[in-house]
Amino acid sequence: MSLIVRHGRLIVAGASALALAACGGAVDGSEELAVIPESLAPFGDGYPGQGDPCRNLGESAATSNYLDDSAVLVGCPSDASAEALGGSIVGNVDGVRLVSVPMGDANAGMVPTVATGDGDAMVAGTDYNATTVLPCGFDNAPPDQSCEAGVKRNWGDDGTHLVEVTKPDGSKRAIFFNGTTPSGADSAEADGSAGWDFSSLRADDRITISFGPETYVVADALIEGG
C-alpha cells in the first residue's frame, strides 16, 4: 500500500485501495480520501465513534457559516462516510464533506449503553451512563461549537447527576444537576473560574447553562435517558 498526498487529498493505493473499491469506493484502483485540515477546527477521535473517519468540527472562519446550535457539524473525507451519518451535506472544503447532523431527537448522537451485572447501564469502556456531543460556546460567544460530554447518573449520595464536558482545548468542565435542573459547576483558581456566575435558561427539553464566559446546551434526555 502507498499513501500519496495530492492537492490536499490523501490517495490510498495498492491492496487496501482494492478492498475499498470492493466496498463501492474507487473505480480505478484507488480512492481519494480528503485530509481534514486544521482550518476546519477538527476535534475528537472520530465521529460518531472513536476511530471513525469523520470528525467533529468546531468554530473557525471556514465553518462559521455552517454551524447551527440545533445540529452537530461533522467533516468527512468521502461521500460514503458522509452519507452514512444520515445528516445533510451542507458544504465541501478542499474535498472534505461538511455534514450537519440534526440534534432534533434529544437522543441523537448518544452512544448506546450496555448493561452491567448489577443492572446499571454504562457506555462500554467508560464510567458514563451515556455520552453525546452538545452545543457549547466560550469567551462569551454563543454555543456554536460542539463539545463531547458524558453523564454519570446518581453520581452523588443525594442523587445528584454529573455531566462532564470536554472543551475543545481538552480540559473538562463538570456540571451538577438535581433532576434536570442544573445546580452548579466545578470551579478552580487555576483556570480563573472561582467566583464565576452560574445561571440557566430552559427552552422545552433543553437547558442553556451559562458559567462565566462559557455556555453549554444540555438535553434532558442525556440526564434522564430513555
Image (cartoon, rainbow, N blue to C red):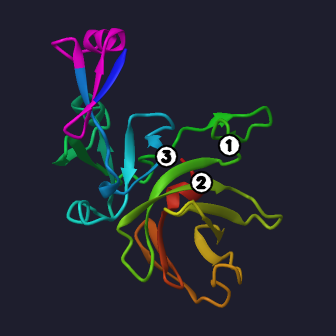
Q: CA distance from mark 1 to mark 2?
A: 9 Å
Residue 110 is marked as 3
Identify which residue, 177 or 188, lies in the foreground.
188
Q: Magenta residues, as a range? A: 5-30
Give the Cα separation between the discs numbered 2 and 3. 9 Å
Q: In this rendering, is residue 152 above or below 94?
A: below
Few, some or many C-alpha atoms within 10 Å of disc 1 (few <14, some 14-19, many ≥20)?
few
In this view, the residue in front, 95 or 83, is 95
Q: Earlier in the sequence, mark 1 or mark 2?
A: 1
Identify the image quadrant of residue 196. Answer: bottom right
- Could you tell me the amino acid type at mark 1? Thr
Residue flagged by tag 2: what amino acid is it? Gly
Kindly identify which residue carries mark 2.
150
For residue 126, the mark is 1
Marked residue nearer the N-terminal end (2 or 3): 3
1 and 2 marks in contact (CB < 8 Å): yes
Q: Which residue: 71% across, 84% down?
A: 189
Estimate the x, y position of residue 72 in percent, counting from the top left. 35, 54
Q: Is residue 56 left or right of residue 151?
A: left
Seen at 30% across and 57% down, the residue is 39
Q: In the rendered view, would you say 138 is above or below 52?
A: below
**Which circle's residue, 3 or 1, is located before the other in the chain?**
3
Q: Find out whether the residues at labels 3 and 1 contact each other: C-beta distance under 8 Å.
A: no
Q: Secondary structure at mark 3?
A: loop
At which x and y percent is residue 85?
32, 37
